Amino acid sequence: MPKGKEHFAEGFKKASVPSIPELIEMAQEMGVTFIGCQMTMDVMGLTKDDFVEGIEVGGAVTFLDFAKDADVSLTF
């Protein structure tokens, strides 16, 4: 958990919700695809190494190409 975000872990534990790393692992086991926005990464100075293993990186076209065939897509 990033420094200063410890209260999130405490809230997950109190609510008997799996931790974020556990949720990521569960999603990956179910075949969820994570796509990081290249432009946002550039603006924020992030690289692929800053994310969970297995993330794909692309722009809007990459996402839209994937999303058109997806059963569900979540963005935030």
Image (cartoon, rainbow, N blue to C red):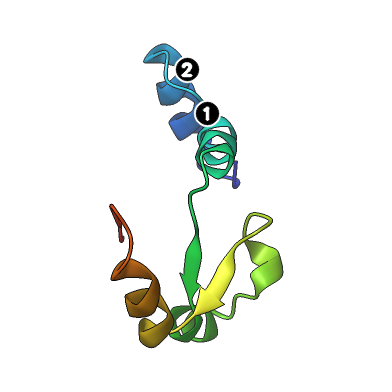
Q: Is residue 61 left or right of residue 6?
A: left
Q: Residues within 10 Å of mark 1 (few under 14, many from 20)?
A: some
Q: Is residue 66 left or right of residue 36?
A: left
| Residues tagged 2 and 1 counted as in contact (Cβ below 8 A) | yes
37 or 26, nearer to the observer? 26
Residue 4 is labelled as none
6 or 33, nearer to the observer? 33
Q: Is residue 57 left or right of residue 59?
A: right
Q: Residue at x 59, y 47 (%)?
A: 2
Q: In the displayed image of the protein, which residue is found farthest to the front?
A: 69
Q: Residue at x 42, y 20 (%)?
A: 17
Q: Mark 2 sits on what residue?
A: 13
**SS type, badge 1:** loop
Residue 19 is labelled as 1
Corner quadrant of residue 59: bottom left
Give, as a three-letter code, the residue at label 1: Ser
Specify the quadrant that holds the N terminus: top right
The correct choice, above or below, for 3 with respect to 21 in the image is below
**SS type, badge 2:** helix
Corner quadrant of residue 57: bottom right
Specify the quadrant that holds the C terminus: bottom left
In the rendering, at what x and y percent does residue 36 appear?
A: 49, 70
In the rendering, at what x and y percent does residue 43 appear?
A: 48, 85
The correct choice, above or below, for 19 with respect to 51 in the image is above
* Cα gap from disc 2 to disc 1, whole angstroms: 7 Å
Give, as a three-letter code, the residue at label 2: Lys
- The mark that comes first in sequence, 2 or 1, is 2
